C-alpha cells in the first residue's frame, strides 16, 4: 500500500487548529477545517478561510500525489477548483 499524501497528513494533524495553506501560485491564507478524513489513501476536508465567507473543500487527486483546493461562494451553486496546496503549516496564534 502506498503512503498517504504528506500535505494531507499535515492538514489532518494540525486540524482543528487553524492551518496556513500555501498554494501553487505562491499565495497563502489561514483556514479552519470543520472536518478532515481519510478513506484509505483518499483525503477530504471541509472548512473556511478566516478572511472569506466562502466554503472550501480539499481533496486528493486521483493518484493521491496532490491536494486540490475548491471554493464555493455563498451565491454559487457549484465548486470551483482554486489551486493545488503545496504546503500546510500550523498557523500562528
Image (cartoon, rainbow, N blue to C red):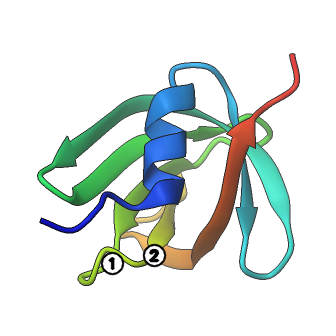
Q: Name the residue under label 2.
A: 66
Q: Can you say whether 70 is above or below 62 in the image? A: above
Q: Which of the image's four quarters has the C terminus?
A: top right
Residue in the picture at 40% in, 42% down: 46
Category of crowding for the residue at label 1, using alpha-carbon neighbours closer than 10 angstroms: few (below 14), some (14–19), many (at least 20): some
Residue in the picture at 57% in, 28% down: 14
Image location (x, y in percent) of residue 54:
58, 49
The residue lying toward the viewer, choosing from 20 and 3, is 3
- Identify the secondary structure beneath mark 1: loop
Q: Are marks 2 and 1 in contact (CB under 8 Å)?
A: yes
Side of 67 where 35 appears, left or right: left
Tell me how many marks there are. Answer: 2
Q: Which of the image's four quarters has the N terminus?
A: bottom left
Q: Mark 1 points at which residue?
A: 61
Side of 1 where 30 appears, left or right: right
The answer to which of marks 2 and 1 sits earlier in the sequence is 1
Q: Can you say whether 31 is above or below 87 in the image? A: above
Asked if residue 75 shows in the view, the reply is: no
Residue in the picture at 46% in, 64% down: 76
Quarter of the image holding residue 5?
Answer: bottom left
Side of 14 where 50 appears, left or right: right
Residue in the picture at 34% in, 68% down: 60
Category of crowding for the residue at label 2, using alpha-carbon neighbours closer than 10 angstroms: few (below 14), some (14–19), many (at least 20): some
Amino acid at each position: 500500500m502506498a503512503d498517504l499524501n504528506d500535505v494531507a497528513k499535515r492538514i489532518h494533524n494540525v486540524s482543528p487548529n487553524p492551518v496556513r495553506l500555501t498554494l501553487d501560485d505562491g499565495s497563502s491564507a489561514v483556514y479552519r477545517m470543520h472536518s478532515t478524513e481519510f478513506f484509505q489513501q483518499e483525503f477530504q476536508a471541509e472548512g473556511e478561510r478566516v478572511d472569506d465567507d466562502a466554503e472550501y473543500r480539499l481533496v486528493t487527486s486521483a493518484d493521491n500525489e496532490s491536494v486540490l483546493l475548491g471554493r464555493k461562494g455563498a451565491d454559487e451553486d457549484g465548486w470551483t477548483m482554486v489551486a493545488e496546496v503545496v504546503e500546510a503549516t500550523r498557523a500562528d496564534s
